[in-house]
Image (cartoon, helix red, strand yellow):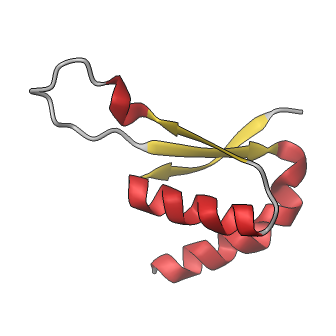
Amino acid sequence: MGLIKIFSGEEILAVSLKERLEEADINVVVRDNNQANVLPSITTAKAVEVFIQEFDYGKAHPVLEAFRMSLG
């Protein structure tokens, strides 16, 4: 089993989701591609990705659904 991506988007939303998942005792890996920009003149923000272990998906599903409902 490995990591699965559960979110890709703005950093502020990724941090919020990460905090919710950690409150549910789920280990989270966040990959911030914005720091990979080499040229400072290019200001395109890249998505921040949130990953969890596959075996945690069942426990994370209710947290993910609540997060999605809070967005819309």
Residue 66: name its quadrant. Answer: bottom right
Viewport quadrant of the C terminus: bottom left
Q: Position of residue 8 (x, y in %)?
A: 50, 48
Asked whether, in this view, residue 60 is left or right of residue 67, the answer is: right
Residue at 90%, 33% in the rendered image: 1
Residue at 72%, 61% in the rendered image: 22
Residue at 86%, 53% in the rendered image: 56
Mark count: 0
Q: Is residue 35 above or below residue 68?
A: above
Task: Out of 30 and 4, give the one closest to the viewer.
Answer: 30
Asked whether, in this view, residue 14 is left or right of residue 58, the answer is: left
Residue 46: name its quadrant. Answer: top left
Asked whether, in this view, residue 5 is left or right of residue 52, the answer is: left
* Most distant residue in the top direction: 38
Q: Position of residue 50 (x, y in %)?
A: 59, 47
Q: Is residue 60 above or below residue 68?
A: above
Q: Position of residue 10 (x, y in %)?
A: 39, 54
Asked whether, in this view, residue 44 is left or right of residue 31, the answer is: left
Q: Is residue 65 above or below residue 39?
A: below
Q: Is residue 50 above or below residue 36?
A: below
Residue 57: name its quadrant. Answer: bottom right
Task: Out of 67 and 26, give the one closest to the viewer.
Answer: 26
Q: Position of residue 9 (x, y in %)?
A: 43, 52
